[in-house]
Amino acid sequence: MTLEPDIVIVGAGAAGIGAARRLASGGLTSLVLEALPRAGGRAWTRNAADVPLDLGCGWLHSADRNPWTRIAEEAGFEVKSGETAWGTQFRDLGFSRVERDAARLSFARWSERTATTPPASDNAADALEPGEPWKPYLQALSGFISGDELERISAKDYGAYDAASTDCNWRVPAGYGTLITASLPAPAALRLSTPVEAISLDERRVALNTSAGTVRASAVIVTVSTNVLAGNGTAWPSALDPWRDAAARLPLGSNEKLFLQIVGDSPFVAETHVLGDLHDALTGSYYIRPFGWQVIECFFGGAGARAVAGHGAAAGFERAIDQLANLFGSAIRRNLKPLVASDWAGTASIRGAYSHALPGEADARLALARPFDGRLFFAGEATHTTDFSTAHGAFQSGVRAAEEAIAALVPAQ
Ligand SMILES: Cc1cc2nc3c(=O)[nH]c(=O)nc-3n(C[C@H](O)[C@H](O)[C@H](O)COP(=O)(O)OP(=O)(O)OC[C@H]3O[C@@H](n4cnc5c(N)ncnc54)[C@H](O)[C@@H]3O)c2cc1C
């Protein structure tokens, strides 16, 4: 590879694509190096049973101010607005409305306490009421939202996301992953299946070693996940140790999605939802027939997702079918067929779901986002101080890093 672009972007996820778009609009050339044989990173739409299924991001969170909403509309993608079925329980199956209201009230109170009277320890578990009867439910929600147990979550970090969220969640029927990968600008060169193995710095430039050769550039935008940056898969210059230390304080939690195909006559109603078990911290959350499709999206978080990753997809499907059979009756077993499952924990160039700050470590996001020496710039969802863990936060971080790089490379007139 002999390309000598103005700027190299490591990673073709939402952040890398956001950076490439901003560089292109500033007239700079970029080369995007991506380890996987596809673009999108944690934005990945796979076609199965003739429908586009998002194994990673699926919801345009804070959709009314989400830049992907505008990009989708400008590019002619349909965007579905309206309420989501989360938080509802189809026909009150398994749990009475009174029980569910009590559980939801406990979550609302915990959330309120993290905002108004945050614990001095900054440990989100310390915002629980003593003897909290709904702790397993709150742990399950913490798993869905943050990918980890409350004991490992910074209350300040959680509160910053919650305060900034507009609670407006829309979807792109063609797939969020489809939208994001279609948004790489034409002027950016993309090299798939090209992991950066080592980064080194000489006096002026940055060298990136790949199996296809060494690329040199004036500046590099690094968008890899925190678990990748903190890990040992790439040789980073020792000068980046403080950035790697910040990344280790913002680990990725665990979240996995499994899709079941519905076959034959079934009781499943379009756009409905059930939680598998209100009293189980490892429970799955089941979105039934999104867009009317004959599929169920099974979502696991935290300990539930670690169990899926640890025991394998077959065991995960079995668990999902067991939970659904408990609610709908065992006759539905014949209606459900395993279709496709994610393995974010096992994907070497990602290694988890989305970042959360450990207690006391919310400021690590700013430390991670700092540029190094006017040559290395950092983007990725984890560098956003409020919209972390999302595809739009990733996009905005890419734009921010690109602007920093442009300011460093293009002298002010
Ligand atoms: C199950 C799940 C559900 C989610 N749901 C939502 C949702 O509904 N809404 C939402 O907004 N967000 C959601 N997210 C989060 C969202 O997907 C991510 O925050 C976002 O996609 C991250 O983008 P990124 O560019 O920061 O990182 P990534 O997408 O991880 O991109 C980084 C890229 O760098 C590549 N890379 C790593 N190392 C190297 C290397 N050495 N050389 C070259 N390339 C390398 C990786 O392969 C990857 O493609 C979800 C995530 C998961 C896992």
Image (cartoon, rainbow, N blue to C red):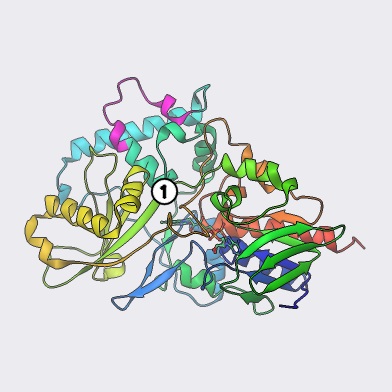
| Relative height, residue 7 to residue 368 (above, below) | below
**Quadrant of residue 332 in the image?**
bottom left
**Quadrant of residue 27 in the image?**
bottom right
Residue 382, given in percent of the width and then of the height, sits at 58, 49
- In this orientation, which residue lies closer to the viewer: 297 or 7? 7
Question: What residue lies at 30% left-to-right and 21% top-to-bottom?
Answer: 131
Q: Quadrant of the N terminus?
A: bottom right
Q: Quadrant of the C terminus?
A: bottom right
| Relative height, residue 353 to residue 114 (above, below) | below
- In this orientation, which residue lies closer to the viewer: 53 or 252? 252
Question: What residue lies at 29% left-to-right and 39% top-to-bottom?
Answer: 281
Residue 293 in the magenta stretch? The answer is no
Residue 25, given in percent of the width and then of the height, sits at 73, 71
Q: Is residue 161 left or right of residue 263?
A: right
Label 1 Cα neighbours within 10 Å, binned few <14 / some 14-19 / many ≥20: many
- Residue annotated with mark 1: 254
**Does residue 404 show up?**
no
- In this orientation, which residue lies closer to the viewer: 162 or 382? 382
Residue 252, given in percent of the width and then of the height, sits at 49, 47
Q: Is residue 166 left or right of residue 129?
A: right
